[in-house]
Image (cartoon, rainbow, N blue to C red):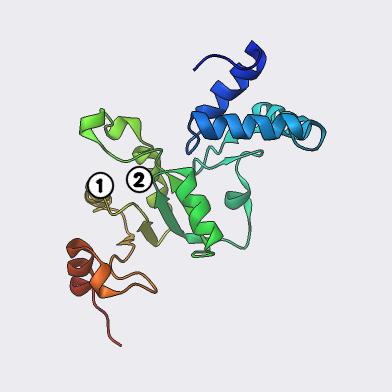
Amino acid sequence: MPAVAGPEIERLIQLLARLPGLGPRSARRAALHLIKKREALMTPLSSALQVAIDKIQVCKTCGNIDTQNPCTVCTDPRRDPSVIVVVADVADLWALERANATNGLYHVLGATLSPLDGVGPQDLTIDALVARAYDQRVTEIILALNATVDGQTTAHYITDLLQDANVKVTRLAHGVPVGGELDYLDEGTLSAAMRQRTLF
C-alpha cells in the first residue's frame, strides 16, 4: 500500500502496529485518532510514556513491574506473607489482582518452561522462588500457571524442587467455568472437572 502521509506519521503507525492486538489497519485508526486528539490524548500519552521509561523498574523481590522497588504489593503490610502465588507473567499477576482473588504475595517467573522455544529453568526466576520458599514465614506456594502443557510442566518442575521445603504446594483448580454449560466444554476441561470434583 502506498504511503498516504509523511514518514513521521508512517513511523507512528508502524510502532503502533507492533502492539499486541493491533494490526496495520487498527494501528492506522489509532494513529489517526491520536493525531485528531493531539492535545487531549497524544501529549499526555507522550508524557506518560516518558515517565514509564524513566521510572518503571522490575521488583527485586517478586518480579512485578512498578515505579518503586520493592513494589507496591511486596511492601503492602496488609498482605499475607505466608502465601506466595507463582505466576508466569506480570499480566497474570494483574489479572489476579483485578479479580481480588488473593491477599498473598507474588512471584513472577518471567515465562513457563518451553523446550521447543528454548526456554529452560535458567531463563526463569525459579532459583529465587525456591529461596523464598525456605523463608520461615512462608507456608503455602500457589502455582497459578496456565493450564497448558508448558504451564503444567513448569508446575511439576517447581513442585519437585520444593519437596524439601516446609511448604504446602497447591495449584489452581481446573474445570467448569462459572456460567459454563457442559455441552460447550471441551473434553479436557470436563475430565479435569470430574477428577477435581468437591463436596457440595
Q: Position of residue 109 (x, y in %)?
A: 39, 41
Q: What residue appears at the point 65 percent right and 27 percent down from the top-left corner? A: 53
Q: Which mark is residue 130?
A: 2
Give left or right: position of 188 versus 131.
left
Direction from residue 137 to residue 48 in the image, left or right? right
User: Residue 147 occupies which quadrant of the picture?
Assistant: bottom left
Give the mark nearest the N terminus, 1 or 2: 2
Q: Amino acid at mark 2?
A: Val
Mark 2 element type: helix
Q: Which mark is residue 161?
A: 1
Q: Nearer the viewer, residue 182 or 82?
A: 182
Horizontal relation, residue 45 to residue 180: left or right: right
Q: Are marks 1 and 2 in contact (CB under 8 Å)?
A: yes
Q: How many angstroms separate mark 1 from mark 2 (CA)?
A: 7 Å
Q: Measured from the top left, where is residue 185 in percent x and y?
A: 25, 66
- Which residue does the image show at 53% across and 42% down from the upper left? 64
- The local secondary structure at tag 1 comes to helix
State the image coordinates of residue 112 (x, y, percent, origin top left). 32, 41
Q: Is residue 24 above or below residue 89?
A: above
Give the percent coordinates (x, y) of residue 40.
80, 38
Q: Which mark is residue 183?
A: none
Q: Residue at x 30, y 88 (%)?
A: 200
Which is nearer the eye, 41 or 92?
41
